[in-house]
Amino acid sequence: MKNTTHPAITRTARTATVEQLVEPKQERAVRTRAHILKAAAELFADQGYQRTSIADVAKRVGMTKGAVYFHFKDKDDIAIAVVEANYQRWPALLDEVKDLDLDPLGMIGELLDRTARAFRDDIVVQAATRLQAERSLIKTSLPQPYQGWIDRLTPLLTQAQEAGQVRADVAPDALARVLVSTFFGMQHVSDVLHGRADLSERWAEVRAFALYALAPH
Ligand code: LUB
């Protein structure tokens, strides 16, 4: 049967299909890079840096090694990108918590509650944490660990201290170091014993104790 569709309609449909199919190059590159990063994070988290190869990443994401190399110089470049993606999460999380209009101590509790859930659920956070634990095995230097969290919590603890919510006899930066070290150890124990499945419960225990220890005396 002869196609009776009006040429203009056919052309519009064809044009729309071409536009839909030809995703702007930049957007496609961003999407592909994100896919590679997630696949690499899954592998780094599961088997670590040394046992992960570019070939493993390419296979996991269904691309050739060459296509992966188009986006990343080498395995270290991917590892650094995973760790950087992890650290980019926390300022955004703090902004979300600041919008909740909580008092300073409430903000600290909510921020770390959400951080505990991210450590339990987010493969990029889990991969970055394993990479930092293996940093001595990685020839390229990774972004500095821990200090970002100390710097993030210190002003919040200062505000809580000024609001009379935190004991006045301990410097906020010292309290921040204790909180970061405690959180790090708590998430590590949960990971080794239970794959972080119980992390929110373990954090709730730490939080109760920390709030008691932080309270004005
Ligand atoms: C946090 C890890 C694992 C500190 O800040 C960091 O570098 C961290 C390593 O990537 O726990 C505790 C919030």
Image (spheres, rainbow, N blue to C red):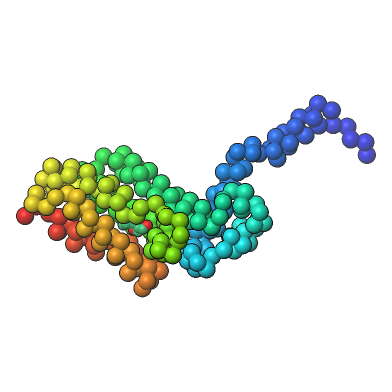
Image spot of residue 30 (x, y percent): 57, 43
Q: Quadrant of ligand 1?
A: bottom left
Residue sitting at the far left: 217
Quadrant location of the N terminus in the rendered image: top right
From the viewer's side, name the closer residue of 108 and 88. Answer: 88
Tell me: residue 93, above or below residue 136: above
Left or right relative to 148: residue 195:
right
Location of residue 102 in the rendering, given as x and y in whole percent from the top left corner: 24, 43
Which residue is painted at 41% across and 54% down in the image? Answer: 142
Query: Where 2 sits versus 139, above or below?
Result: above
The C terminus - image quarter: bottom left
Q: How many labels were placed on the picture? A: 0
The extreme right residue here reads 1
Question: Left or right: 167 with respect to 123?
Answer: left
Vertical placement of 175 versus 55: above or below? above
User: Farthest residue in the front direction?
Assistant: 139
Residue furthest top as drawn: 8
Relative placement, left or right, of 71 versus 180 is: right
Q: Is residue 190 left or right of residue 11?
A: left
Residue 53, located in which quarter of the rendered image? bottom right
**Residue at the spot x=41%, y=61% of the render?**
135
- Expressed as whole percent of the image width and height from the top left, the position of residue 77 reads 51, 53
Residue 62 in sight here: yes
Q: Nearer the viewer, residue 59 or 102?
A: 59
x and y percentages locating residue 89 in the rendered image: 40, 48
User: Looking at the image, which residue is at 45% across and 61% down?
Assistant: 138
**Residue sitting at 23 percent across and 55 percent down?**
177
Query: In the rendered image, is residue 121 in sight?
Result: no
